[in-house]
């Protein structure tokens, strides 16, 4: 199976100085007229949306509007749900991830996911991070694996807190630490995109702040899409915001503009707390 997800090197070819804005903000993921059904029920009604490289895109909207469904469609998590059917396409660096020749396991190494509730494996902290790289043979020996584990924990801002207890169970950490461990686990397989579904909803405010500043750092290296029910969080962490309502994308744009000057009345009603 061949899955070419390397970025076309527009930057080197043209030199950054000459690039137009569109080229600079090349979409990492391009969602085109995506429709999704659970059995007979259509949950997404034709979503078209570009997720730019190396930035944070927030999905907001009232409960049940399809945020998680859309997020899961970006690494084919919906494949696991019986009766789920999709139409349209999701292009990752120009390649449709729903093409017949795409290896889903491979895809998920490129597009990692962090869930609402921290869900470390019932294994040591070290093993939580080393598990997937071992399966994908990303480290040739023990020393390389140690290095990869340390690097992933550092990137997840967890290393200093756990470096002396790598052999303790991941589940013994605090909720916020567990979520950073899950982020380290995701980073360890060197993804290009990280999907986060309400990653702070089970965390206290201090742990939430830590995850938010981590997201800020991670966007330098990864493309991030985050579902959040907190508009304050969307405003704090994202550059782009997409507002959904009943399976439709109502409005999408720069986060600042969405929150200060929305074009659609429904967006305005939602962000000003008139419904949701
Ligand atoms: N596994 C599923 N099977 C059937 N329907 C589902 C499933 N997951 C979500 N739905 C339905 O799809 C719609 C969108 O849900 P979801 O994506 O979870 O919304 P959100 O994340 O915005 O709260 C809802 O009507 C929900 O009931
Ligand atoms: Mg959800």
Image (cartoon, helix red, strand yellow):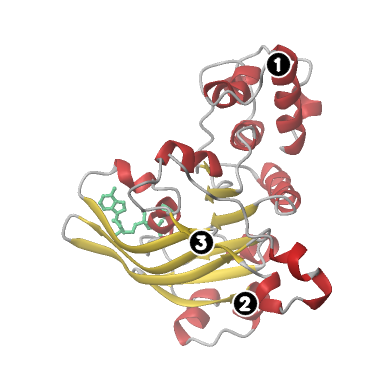
Q: Residue at x 47, y 43 (%)?
A: 2
- Label 3 SS: loop
Instruction: Specify which label sits upstream in the sequence, 2 or 3.
Output: 3
Which quadrant is home to the C terminus? bottom left
Describe the element under mark 2 as helix, strand or loop.
Answer: helix
- Residue 95, percent across and down? 47, 57
Above or below residue 143? Residue 128 is: below
Q: Nearer the viewer, residue 163 or 61?
A: 163
State yes or no: Cβ of the residue under disc 1 lies below 8 Å from any atom of ligand 2: no
Which numbered disc, 1 or 3, marks the residue closer to the eye? 3
Mark 2 Cα shell of 10 Å, populated few (<14), some (14-19), many (≥20): some
Residue 233, percent across and down? 63, 60
Question: Within 10 Å of the Cα at label 3, are there few (<14), some (14-19), or many (20+) other Cα atoms?
Answer: some
Up/down of 35 relative to 172, above or below: below
Q: Is residue 12 left or right of residue 85?
A: right
Q: Residue at x 80, y 69 (%)?
A: 15
Q: Position of residue 189 (x, y in %)?
A: 60, 34
Q: Find disc 2 in the rendering and name its residue.
A: 259
* Residue 63, quarter of picture: bottom left
6 with respect to 142 (left or right):
left
- The quadrant of the rendered image in which ligand 1 is seen is bottom left
Q: Which residue is mark 3?
A: 94
Q: Say which residue appears at 76% left-offset and 71% top-offset.
A: 14
Q: Earlier in the sequence, mark 2 or mark 1?
A: 1
- For disc 1, the marked residue is 166
Q: CA distance from mark 1 to mark 3?
A: 39 Å
Q: Of callouts 1 and 3, which one flags the residue occurring earlier in the amino acid sequence? A: 3
Q: CA distance from mark 2 to mark 1?
A: 42 Å
User: Within 10 angstroms of label 1, few (less than 14), some, or many (20 or more) residues?
Assistant: some
**Residue at image point 56% right, 21% down:** 131
Q: SS for tag 1?
A: loop
- Do the numbered discs 1 and 3 sit on residues whose CB atoms are within 8 Å? no
């Amino acid at each position: 199976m061949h899955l070419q997800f390397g970025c076309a090197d527009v930057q080197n070819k043209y030199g950054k100085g000459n690039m137009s804005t569109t080229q600079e903000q090349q979409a990492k993921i391009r969602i085109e007229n995506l429709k999704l059904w659970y059995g007979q029920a259509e949950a997404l009604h034709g979503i078209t949306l570009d997720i730019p490289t190396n930035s944070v895109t927030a999905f907001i909207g009232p409960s049940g509007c399809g945020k998680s469904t859309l997020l899961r469609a970006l690494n084919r998590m919906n494949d696991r749900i019986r009766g789920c059917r999709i139409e349209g396409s999701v292009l990752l660096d120009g390649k449709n991830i729903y093409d017949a020749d795409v290896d889903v396991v491979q895809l998920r190494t490129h597009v990692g996911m962090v869930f609402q509730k921290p869900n470390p494996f019932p294994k040591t902290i070290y093993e939580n991070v080393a598990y997937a790289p071992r399966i994908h043979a990303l480290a040739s020996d023990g020393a390389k694996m140690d290095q990869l584990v340390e690097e992933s924990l550092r990137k997840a801002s967890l290393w200093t807190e756990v470096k002396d207890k790598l052999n303790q169970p991941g589940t013994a950490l605090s909720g916020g630490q567990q979520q950073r461990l899950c982020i380290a686990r995701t980073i360890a397989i060197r993804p290009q995109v990280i999907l986060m579904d309400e990653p702070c909803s089970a965390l206290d405010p201090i742990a939430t702040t830590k995850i938010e500043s981590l997201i800020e750092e991670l966007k330098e290296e990864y493309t991030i899409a985050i579902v959040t029910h907190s508009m304050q969080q969307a405003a704090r962490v994202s550059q782009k915001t997409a507002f959904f309502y009943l399976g439709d994308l109502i409005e999408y744009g720069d986060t600042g503009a969405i929150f200060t000057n929305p074009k659609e009345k429904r967006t305005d009603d939602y962000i000003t707390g008139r419904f949701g």
